[in-house]
Amino acid sequence: MRGRQVFMDSLVAHGTQAIFGNPGTTENPLLDSLLDYPDITYYVALHEGIAVGAASYYARASGKTAVANLHVAPGLGNAIGMIYGALKGAAPMIVTAGQQDTRMRLRDPVLRHDLVAMAQPVTKWAVEAQYADEIAPIMRRAFKIAIEPPAGPVFVALPINVMEQETDIGAVTAGELYPRNLPAADGVARIVELLVASERPAIVTGDEVVAAQGSTLLTRLVELTGAAVFTEFLRTSQPIANHHPNLRGRIPPDGASIAQLLSAYDCVLLLGGAFFEEIWFDAGDSLPPGITVAQIESAPSRLAHNYSLDAGVVGHLPECLRALLSGLEEKVDDTYRSGARQRNAEFLSVNRSEADDYATQFETRRGAAPMSPGEAFHAIATTLPDDVLIVDETVTSGTDMGRAFALDQNNFYSGRGGGIGQGLAGALGVSIARPQHKVVVFSGDGSAMYSIQALWTAAHHELDILFVILSNREYRVLKHNLDIYRSRFKALAERPYPHMDLTHPELGFANMARGMGVEARTVASADDITSALAVAQSQAGPFLLDVLIAGKP
């Protein structure tokens, strides 16, 4: 058998049903082989970054290891940013790229480069097959490494002649593995002691809680302890329902603000994430003095990576949470339970007050022109069915989106790493992973232009996606960050924002969408949104709303 058959058989053996790709000449062995593997669907993207972005979100929405297929050095280069996002987002994925015939490597053929060196900085493992005999063991190892916590992308280069070589070594998997390790009992007991002794506990939760299906257990822990809970500043998922009263928002992106926020608490539990990802430098520790710190992770590499701990435990997160809950149930007394109930009641009161304040602000801005983001989200949320899946790349209007929609571990997807353009591409992957649901993706206009080709793929594969472009005609987040920069570095303020406006000419998203086969409307009011969505819901396939909203005040 040939190497390409071993490669395809390896995908089948590992349960692959979808490949996301942008093909080229060196990918001909794979493309030609697809005719013999009808159970694997190839989803065509018009740019390699779109393929990887879609695969990344598909992995998280399906719970499977995704496969992306790229075209030699330029194609891999086009996709590096999205691979970085997949690495930061812990998306298990096999990224392949064709390579020129190895017999020509000394001739420096067109498109050839050191693909392994290119991919290594943004993957967990990068390798190039030198012989067809290597393809089966490489694919076995690649799938295993991709899912090891923290999960992430693996890169495999496939020279065209190696794919056509004969081999007797067939596809193989790693076998039935049971890698869920139990937490150390004494470590769990120590964290129980810290939480029982705490009068003001806080939990900072990462994305891995959702990946490990531990959100229900996390919610029980939050309510049992009366803890405040925070998510990471950038998150791919919603570890606890966004309207839960104990959820107090996101961790800030700078050390001084993190320390100030956590100074209200005497004990913090870090749970399943990369703590902390900062944007701005501040001298000193991000954790306030005197606070006790515990951490639970599924991988030893993350434990105490940046901070000293009073207790740290490694284990499968749901097993750790179950052990923690069991230990607390045995240890806490009526006084502790009363204190937890009091804290929960206080959070509920604050939550209701914040909701009332937001409602008041919402009413003062209702009917404004241009429309406020909050009014746009409200109009969309009240029109769509409750079971839609949300892909979020709102960047600066996430608070408004969260007020309008109820988000949890089952319906929310976003990106990490800070690179923009993930939303539109990611919506493709979510829709393919969960085709029984309508997908709604929210993206700023600047972010959308990084991956606008995703519209063609949605039309080509007839995906049920509503693309909502929030058009404020600017890079709003950059303006906010320029304000912060000027304040931090004592630069002159009250000056223009250079090169941050998307005007002259303005972007015509409705026309772009129609040019790629997607029906579209441009809307400027809540009534416009309602009527446009009535059209969108009356027809099959993708639809785009270009929503004109107010920019930075």
Image: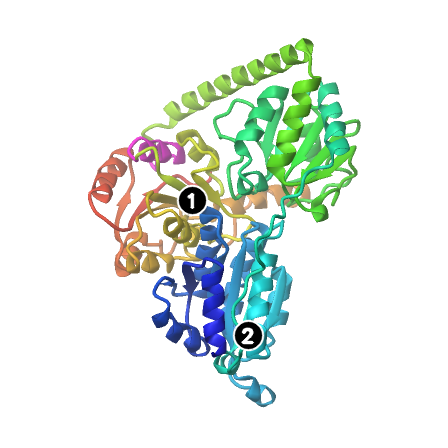
Q: Nearer the viewer, residue 227 or 135?
A: 135
Image location (x, y in percent) of residue 288 = 75, 30
Name which residue type carries label 2.
Ile
Residue 247 is one of the magenta-drawn residues: no
**Is the residue 411 above or below the residue 113 in the image?**
above
Image location (x, y in percent) of residue 10 = 49, 66
* Residue 31 found in image quarter: bottom left
Residue at 68 percent across and 37 percent down: it is 296
Q: Which residues are magenta?
A: 369-384
Residue at 51 percent across and 48 percent down: it is 415
Residue at 75 percent across and 23 percent down: it is 193
Residue 372 is one of the magenta-drawn residues: yes
**Of helix, strand and loop, which one carries label 2?**
loop
Residue at 32 percent across and 44 percent down: it is 436
Q: Which mark is residue 169?
A: 2
Question: Is residue 340 something that shows in the picture?
Answer: yes
**Is the residue 504 above or below the residue 370 in the image?**
below
Q: Callout 2: few (<14), some (14-19), or many (20+) C-alpha neighbours within 10 Å?
A: some
* Residue 290 found in image quarter: top right
Mark positioned earlier in the residue sequence (1 or 2): 2
**Of helix, strand and loop, which one carries label 1?**
strand
Image location (x, y in percent) of residue 149 = 63, 49
Give the residue pinned by disc 1: 391
* Residue 145 found in image quarter: bottom right
Q: Nearer the viewer, residue 146 or 458?
A: 146
Name which residue type carries label 1.
Val
> Is 424 situated left or right of 302 in this image?
left
Question: Is residue 226 something that shows in the picture?
Answer: no
> Is 509 situated left or right of 264 in this image?
left
Image location (x, y in percent) of residue 490 = 68, 43
Q: In whole angstroms, how far apart are the C-alphas of marks 1 and 2?
A: 42 Å
